[in-house]
Image (cartoon, coloured by chain):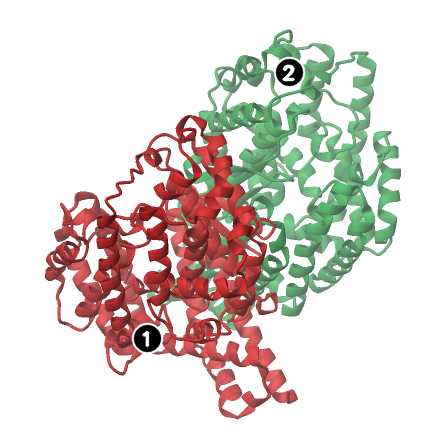
Chain colours: A green, B red
């Protein structure tokens, strides 16, 4: 590599390291806000995060950064760069182009409004009172519409927002996939109905000591491969995974005494995200490549561990005796096989994060449609509660009793995460596609899981997905691993097999 | 106020707000590092904090900031500013001037040397081998001498270093005060000796359940007035108070099963710092005034609550029944009156941080004299161990058995904190002076404490000290509250009264 290029690339890296450090700082402040921050600090914290984000934005969009990128790209000197260096440059340029489009003042406004909105959302949800959140949400919707205009789009302003989470994805590509997914889901719900099987999961909602739940869940993710030397687990209202570096990955979970699923599957889910972050090539530390390549791919990793592993029969053959010994009063009469069925009950329910694998996508399609309408100005803030409830009735056959179990249930809109929801269903589709590919490479994986051995599985994901960070795009990964682009087929095949196991006793 | 001045001051404030937000972010990262951060994150975190601190330094010393200050000061437009605005400008200028005086190269060298020195100090202390630390300490002494030269001084280069912690304080002012303090202390130690009383505090070092200790200490500081809506308490290896804003004040403590003092008095001490931060006028949020005015004044607040309140007879009349009920096995045979004596035992000991109220100052005077000699070139690094031990024998009548309990005991010199130690004794003197003034305004305060009522006391400190933040200098505060400058008299009066209580049973 030419020494001038070398020097320019070093300068480029030095800039991206500063940005990476400030981004990490902003994330620490965000994590603290959700875990330990005292209530009184909300306003000052909002300002601090806004300041950091404004500085990051300034540096991303600075002429200096622009010139460095230009020099490395257009002088043809990119030919002197290694593969990862080119990828780092590409990722930085992509993010920089998006950032350049947003005026400083707008970024500051967005950061401040969303930071405050999160506090009002918490209050609104706890009191099940949409009016508490209403004004903040109205501001956010207005901001997101302007956000889309700034970013630009060809067909649909909502595309611009989806692209922030799933680079390259568009409403027109998603809609037919979601339509087929919705049809397939309806067909499978019928199939479940026709089985006549009525599996009660009532035992999950009895009484389980919270600290025993948490320690069991922690033991499980440790076994799966989450590294506690480079990460930790805390409690928060809404579970999430935050990474402040490849060696500092924080998970949060919540524990309900009367819901055995929430803490365990929530933590396995977040650990899936966390293991992705921990698996990124350490050489990418503090570069633009040190992150998951998209929200959809990120979600594929969390769902892979939560569902393909954590809700498999083999997993429960291994894990159940330990769970049973924690809660003998509740579980001594239930077999591993039955427990597997119990945690795979598929039926309509109100809360997205508590939904089963099958009906979950309907919750996403509902949000996708509402967001599409909001961003396109076909719907306004005051219409949300009714639209939500109508679609719930239409798609899932149930109506929320209040907004806490309706349109206030998710944190996403409070931080302006419009365009994020589709990633969850993309994650399901990617996960099933990767799972199909994994089955070919690791035909013995079922037996390993049954013995509590997850090393080969994790190594496979590390090799195929994790280590690349952002060095490969979602489309590249999917094509390389599966030999085909995104589709709903693998998911429907996977879930139908599980329905056969759960509802038709096929093994 | 003229509208041009107005506009310039707004620009000035906007700059200082950014600096304040970055400083808060750096503090959050530092706090997290000491409380929750996973071990693996150490390297990435060090980079993040270094990046934030470099940015803060850049902004402090920027031409832009310099021009704004110059414009506000030298154009005579300061006349248009309000009192707090002038104070904010003065504080920022002072800190900026100090920062500007240091060449970048020197700051880097200092940071590198002290970072290495901290490692060698740890090793030296754990092996009790001064020679391991010797070369690094020699470099640091050289650096601190140059530091003083860069900062500038009139009479004594050590003044320049003390000024970093106690603005305006000088060796020539301190020396006679410390001499009289030392004489008074010697006299009082004789008085204790002549009492013939031999109070054993052995019970404090038996066995106390850590979680019961912590919850008792938390209850106490809540009663004293530490606001948990705007703050919280966590555990760390070394106790500290960190403020990320007036409404976000974090305390840490540590709990030893075999030392009842550490958690309780440590937390009361940190809560004293914390209540100072929480009491600053909220209008000063994110300005250069939103901090304690000096290390000495800060320490006066922590010591006021720890000693004047937390080690008073009245306090234990109120708090002891509750402590006793927590630890009936240990404390049922001991009365409140006896317990008050037990926590006030005064006798010479080797370790500064474990010293009692009276002998503590001798540890400081020893360090003050050695630092003064070192910075003035009258002493060199190799003389330290002997000078230390000679002074220990002379002032406290005991000689360290090794350097770990002698000149290697404190972390301060390893990070180049020369000039810091005097603040601790200044804190004791200020606290006693404020206490004397308080007695005139609140003659009933003893009775209130006996009833567990601390509201009037806290309001008094808020009004006189806390709310001003950095808007008043230490000297201004002392003169306004006490009508006289710094002296040792109030402390000696206060401590003699306590000696009469503890060793002569006078009430």
Question: What x and y, as percent, mark residue A124?
Answer: 76, 46
Q: Would you say B249 lies left or right of A371 here?
A: left
Residue A200 versus residue A499: which sits nearer the camera?
A200
Closer mark to the observer between disc 1 and disc 2: 1
Question: What x and y, as percent, mark residue A103?
Answer: 65, 69
The quarter of the image holding the C terminus of chain A is: top right
Residue A127 position (above or below residue B257):
below
Residue for point 45% across, 71% down: B482
Q: Secondary structure at mark 1?
A: loop
Chain letter for mark 2, please: A
Residue for point 61% across, 69% down: B283
Tag on residue B102?
1
| Visible residue check, residue A286 | no
Question: What x and y, as percent, mark residue A51?
Answer: 57, 64
Tag on residue A251?
none
Question: What x and y, as percent, mark residue B86?
Answer: 53, 81
Chain letter for mark 1, please: B
- Residue named by callout 2: A340
Q: Residues within 10 Å of mark 2 (few under 14, many from 20)?
A: many
């Amino acid at each position: 590599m030419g020494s001038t290029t070398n020097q320019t690339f070093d300068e480029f890296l030095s800039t991206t390291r500063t940005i990476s450090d400030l981004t990490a700082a902003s994330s620490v402040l965000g994590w603290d806000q959700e875990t330990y921050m005292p209530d009184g600090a909300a306003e000052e914290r909002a300002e601090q995060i806004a300041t950091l984000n404004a500085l990051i934005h300034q540096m991303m969009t600075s002429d200096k950064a622009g010139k460095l990128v230009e020099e490395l790209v257009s002088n043809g000197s990119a030919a002197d760069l290694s593969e990862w260096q080119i990828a780092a440059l590409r990722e930085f340029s992509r993010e920089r182009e998006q950032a350049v489009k947003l005026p400083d003042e707008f970024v500051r406004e967005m950061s401040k409004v969303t930071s405050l909105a999160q506090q009002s959302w918490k209050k609104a949800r706890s009191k099940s009172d949409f009016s508490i959140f209403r004004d903040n949400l109205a501001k956010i919707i207005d901001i997101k519409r302007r956000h889309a205009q700034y970013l630009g789009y060809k067909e649909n302003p909502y595309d611009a927002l989806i692209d922030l989470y799933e680079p390259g994805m568009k409403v027109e590509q998603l809609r037919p996939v979601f339509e087929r997914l919705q049809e397939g889901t309806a067909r499978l719900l019928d199939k479940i109905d026709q089985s006549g099987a009525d599996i009660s999961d009532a035992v999950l909602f009895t009484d389980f000591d919270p600290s025993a739940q948490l320690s069991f869940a922690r033991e499980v993710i440790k076994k799966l491969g989450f590294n506690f030397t480079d990460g930790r687990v805390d409690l928060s209202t809404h579970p999430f995974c935050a990474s402040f570096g490849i060696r500092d990955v924080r998970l949060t979970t919540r524990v309900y005494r009367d819901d055995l699923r929430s803490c365990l599957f929530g933590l396995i889910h977040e650990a899936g995200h966390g293991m992705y972050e921990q698996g990124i090539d350490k050489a990418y530390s503090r570069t633009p490549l040190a992150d998951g390549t998209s929200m959809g791919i990120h979600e594929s990793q969390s769902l892979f561990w939560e569902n393909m592993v954590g809700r498999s029969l083999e997993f429960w053959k291994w894990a159940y005796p330990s769970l049973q010994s924690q809660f003998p009063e509740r579980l001594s009469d239930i077999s591993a096989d039955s427990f597997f069925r119990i945690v795979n009950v598929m039926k309509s329910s109100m809360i997205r994060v508590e939904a089963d694998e099958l009906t979950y996508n309907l919750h996403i399609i509902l949000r996708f449609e509402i967001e599409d309408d909001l961003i396109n100005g076909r719907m306004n803030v005051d219409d949300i509660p009714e639209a939500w409830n109508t679609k719930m009735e239409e798609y899932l056959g149930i109506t929320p009793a209040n907004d806490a179990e309706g349109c206030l249930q998710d944190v996403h809109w409070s931080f302006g995460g419009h365009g994020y929801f589709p990633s969850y269903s993309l994650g399901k589709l990617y996960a099933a596609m990767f799972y199909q590919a994994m089955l070919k490479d690791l035909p013995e994986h079922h037996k390993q899981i049954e013995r509590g051995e997850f090393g080969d599985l994790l190594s496979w994901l590390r090799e195929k997905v994790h280590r690349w960070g952002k060095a490969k795009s979602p489309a590249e990964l999917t094509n390389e691993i599966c030999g085909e682009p995104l589709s709903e087929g693998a998911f429907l095949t996977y879930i139908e097999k599980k329905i056969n196991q759960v509802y038709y006793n096929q093994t």
